[in-house]
Amino acid sequence: GEDVEQSLFLSVREGDSSVINCTYTDSSSTYLYWYKQEPGAGLQLLTYIFSNMDMKQDQRLTVLLNKKDKHLSLRIADTQTGDSAIYFCAEVTDKLIFGTGTRLQVFP
Amino acid sequence: IAGITQAPTSQILAAGRRMTLRCTQDMRHNAMYWYRQDLGLGLRLIHYSNTAGTTGKGEVPDGYSVSRANTDDFPLTLASAVPSQTSVYFCASTRGLIEQYFGPGTRLTVT
């Protein structure tokens, strides 16, 4: 079956690193994604990782993939107040399946 | 270039009424999706279409129907709205496995 799970909340101080975690169940996923949703807006694709990769870095964002444990994480370095949003991980097999979302709150 | 648009932006609807949420994309993407977003539940897939002329059921299809007469349009219809369908609805489209675009959402309240 397809199930993607995330913790609901994360609170960090500005300037610290944030790590948002996600677990998925479908081992046939080809791509895994991280989306960002700001208040009142739709989802914006942040980054993605192909299933045969372990890590991908894109400026302040680092994605780690552990296929054995079906665990995906997103690390945001030097977290800013503008990073406050809901972050969704998603996997794709024949369709997109989203996690429940993690609300990141950044405080000064 | 508009990308993907949804209409209306928001709507208050009496229970039992019929409602169609519109979604249009101008990117010639093959696949389109409808999701609902509810607090604590994330995004749940309602229906999808991999290409014009085909549709499929997602995780929560009951009470909803879709059609895909052409590549650009993917309307979602609530035949007889119920309060549990109060939600924010997002339409999305993809061409391949990387490019995914979401509309701005439709906030629907069923009273």
Image (tube, rainbow, N blue to C red):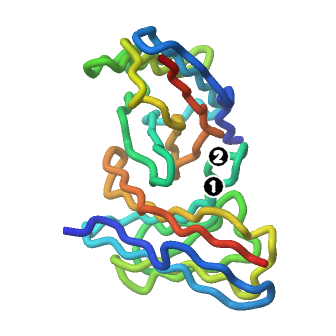
Mark 2 is surrounded, within 10 Å at the Cα level, by few (under 14), some (14 to 19) or many (20 or more) other residues, namely many
Q: Residue at x 72, y 62 (%)?
A: B60
Q: Is residue A27 visible?
A: yes
**Nearer to the camera, A44 or B67:** A44
**Nearer to the camera, B15 or A71:** B15
**Nearer to the camera, B3 or A95:** B3
Q: Secondary structure at mark 1?
A: strand
Mark 1 is surrounded, within 10 Å at the Cα level, by few (under 14), some (14 to 19) or many (20 or more) other residues, namely some
Q: State which quadrant residue B51 falls in.
A: bottom left
What residue does disc 1 label?
B37
- Give the answer, above or below, for where B39 lies relative to A30: below
- The answer to whether the residue labelled 2 contacts the one labelled 1, judged by CB atoms less than 8 Å apart, is yes
Q: Is residue A94 visible?
A: no
Q: Amino acid at mark 2?
A: Gly
Q: Residue at x 61, y 51 (%)?
A: B43
Q: x%, y% of residue B66?
A: 57, 79
Q: Which image quadrant: the C terminus of chain B? A: bottom right
Q: x%, y% of residue A19?
A: 52, 15
Q: Secondary structure at mark 2?
A: strand
- Give the answer, above or below, for where B109 lies relative to A20: below
